[in-house]
Image (cartoon, grey):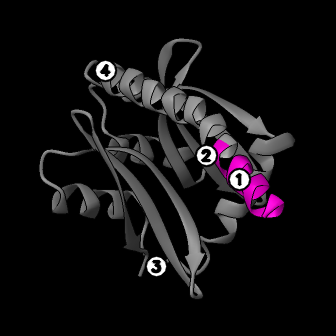
């Protein structure tokens, strides 16, 4: 009986401890959704603009130090870069090599999903947006599912968020 009570307490505390994280995520999403209203460039256009730096392997809008940022990871000859796109003009603002840490780990994982892809991330994002009228793409990440390359596309419309999976056939 004592074990059951301990387990119940642990589960209750675990739920209580995760509540602040969920609140922070909701707050972050609300902040991002609000900032997106000022972005004139779509995720699809950012992916296209970054292609001169290499093959796009992921892209996202994010809040960086309280400001909206549009970031695309690219791969070229076993080297990775983060390409920052100006979200108002669609031009490349800066390109930085990715050489270490969590960013390099993420870039390697994303790049590993792309050799089996016969379709670009830009096309996958376009299909997801077209199939979900009124939504805007916020991010796209490739992965392998059941041996096939897919793209996870996160979309937002007002305060409604959803993630859809598009095959990269």
Q: Which residue, given by chain and number where applicable, does mark 1 sit on?
A: 107
* Discs 4/2, front: 4
Write the residue at 78% across / 59% down.
78
Q: Which residue, given by chain and number where applicable, does mark 3 sit on?
A: 118
Q: Which residue, given by chain and number where applicable, does mark 2 sit on?
A: 73
| Direction from residue 46 to residue 99 in the image, left or right | right
Q: CA distance from mark 1 to mark 4?
A: 28 Å
Q: Quadrant of residue 97?
A: top right
Going from the N terminus, do you reach mark 1 or mark 4 first?
Answer: 4
Badge 4 density bin: few <14, some 14–19, many ≥20, Cα 10 Å: some
Q: Residue furthest left?
A: 133
State the image coordinates of residue 27 (x, y, percent, origin top left): 44, 24
Are dots 3 and 2 in contact, CB under 8 Å?
Answer: no
Q: Which mark, by number, is residue 34?
A: 4
* Discs 3/4, front: 4
Write the residue at 45% across / 61% down.
152
């Amino acid at each position: 009986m004592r074990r059951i009570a301990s387990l119940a307490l642990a589960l209750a505390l675990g739920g209580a401890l995760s509540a602040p994280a969920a609140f922070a995520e909701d707050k972050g999403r609300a902040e991002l959704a609000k900032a997106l209203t000022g972005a004139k460039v779509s995720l699809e256009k950012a992916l296209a603009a970054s292609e001169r730096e290499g093959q796009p392997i992921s892209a996202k809008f994010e809040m960086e130090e309280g400001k909206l940022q549009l970031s695309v990871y690219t791969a070229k000859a076993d080297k990775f870069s983060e390409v920052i796109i100006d979200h108002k003009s669609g031009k490349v603002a800066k390109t930085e090599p990715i050489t270490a840490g969590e960013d390099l780990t993420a870039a390697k994982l994303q790049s590993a999903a792309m050799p089996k892809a016969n379709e670009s991330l830009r096309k996958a994002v376009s299909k997801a947006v077209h199939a979900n009228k009124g939504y805007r793409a916020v991010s796209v990440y490739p992965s392998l599912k059941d041996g096939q390359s897919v793209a996870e596309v996160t979309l937002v419309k007002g305060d409604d968020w959803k993630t859809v999976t598009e095959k990269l056939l």
